[in-house]
Amino acid sequence: MDLMAGMTTKTSRRSFLRSAVPIPFIVPAAAVCVTAHGQTMPNDKLVMGLIGTGRQCYHQNIPGFVRNKRTQVVALCDVDLWRLEESKKKVAEIYEKSVSLTKPAAIQTYTDYKELLERSDIDAVMISTPDHWHTQQAVEAMKAGKHVALEKPIIRTIAEGQQLVSTAAETKRIFRVDSEFRSGKGAHRAAELVRNGRLGDIKSVLVCVPDTDVSCPPQKEMPVPPELDYGRWQGNAPKAFYTLKRVHTPHNISERSGWMRHLYYCDGMVTNWGTHLLNGALWALGLDRTFPEEIEGTGQYPDADSFWNVLLQFSINYRYKNDDYKNGLQITYKTGKPFYRIEGEKGTLSVSFDWSKDVPGGIQAEPASLLDEKIGSDEIHFPLRSEKEDFVDSVLNNKETLEPAIVGHCVTSSLLLGHIAVRTGEKVNFDPEVQAFVNSPKAAAYFDKRITDSRS
């Protein structure tokens, strides 16, 4: 069937993107469309809006999308007017300095993301808001016809993961977890080696993330900075007084924000870096589209009077048993030096963010000859490209990304299962087929409930 059959010359690439099913298609690069601003632009441009302009957006997502010749960023949204203006300046500066990028007619700013989503000329959004906003904004964006790149961790409950998966399927929108670890040469190489059997039967797996979360003395209420719409910032989180260490430092776009260490808004390191490192290990093992069956964990929260209250340290054991691992496979996930190690009967691979000259590509092997293994043309291959390029290419060619909603759900929900096991202090049993807890009533209470306190 010719997918382009029946399309008139008046049918824009944008309207086709909004109605197409996920099969590859080709649009002539010479064709043009007209945006809501009356601007003519090439049909192969992805018109984007960025929601949330904090540290990650400013330093990573703005450069990543603005400098991409196949995208055009036309809108920004944030509840902090200072950050919004600084980000607008950065977008404009990149366009002004480049001779190869097409500058948009205007870069519009919004404090209400719903207004940005109403724009019919925007194809896709990059969401970089605090974690407690992720699912709500991504679901609304897809229902508004936008393709979505969503900062990790994408969810705070298992039910939210199910909602993202079902919404992506129902709306036929392209979804990408915006996590760069799979774009590293080490994680990519490990995935191809393990998936193609170069380690033989897997014997043990260890995954570690940094133990850099800390406690914080009790905080007092402070005046809300005039540039911050604090009510909008809180959104669906429990209502609480404003204090600097709950949100982010005013007029600063580089410091780590306090919300990342508070359970009202985030699960802390257990999901934060886990969506890099456990994600990479599960990808290599072929377990990134399923769930563990048994989960046990211990951990330490700060003292009861600490304002920041995410886990300081933890040790979690996951047990998998499926067609690939009939005898069961245990993955140990804990705090420590960040890396993951997969040991098989034929050797061991270790992968990390250490991309120094001593660890080329962030991967080490024992024996070292494993890294010289060739992957045949008839074996499993994965694309090696940035997470931004993967998203853009997938949208423009209407195909699944390397980290679609189902992968984001399975990986992040597995991390949440670990946190739930620590929080309840009990062994958790989970049925991967029906995505339900088995004989674990305390854990089941968190299926659609966020962990917002270390003691409740």
Image (cartoon, grey):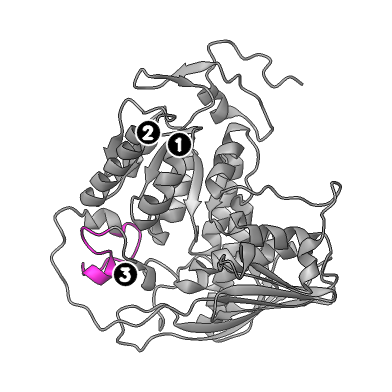
Residue where numbered disc 3 is placed: 258
Q: Quadrant of the N terminus?
A: top right
Residue 189, given in percent of the width and then of the height, sits at 71, 59
Residue 187, given in percent of the width and then of the height, sits at 65, 61
User: SS class of the residue under badge 1?
Assistant: loop
Residue where numbered disc 2 is placed: 118
Label at residue 77: none
Q: Nearer the viewer, residue 166 or 85?
A: 85
Residue 290 in sight from this viewpoint? no
Residue 7 in sight from this viewpoint? yes
Q: Nearer the viewer, residue 410 or 91?
A: 91
Relative height, residue 137 to residue 15 (above, below): below
Q: Which residues are magenta?
A: 234-252
Q: Are marks 3 and 1 in contact (CB under 8 Å)?
A: no
Q: Residues within 10 Å of mark 2 (few under 14, many from 20)?
A: few
Residue where numbered disc 1 is placed: 144
Q: Are marks 1 and 2 in contact (CB under 8 Å)?
A: yes
For image coordinates 24% across by 56% down, the residue present is: 231
Q: Nearer the viewer, residue 452 or 223?
A: 223
Quadrant of residue 453 within the rendered picture: bottom left
For the residue marked with disc 3, what is the amino acid?
Gly
Quadrant of residue 183 within the rendered picture: bottom right
For image coordinates 51% across by 73% down, the residue present is: 270
Relative height, residue 418 to residue 54 (above, below): below
- Distance from disc 3 to disc 2, alpha carbons, whole Å, reads 31 Å
For image coordinates 65% across by 32% down, the residue present is: 21
Relative height, residue 359 to residue 25 (above, below): below
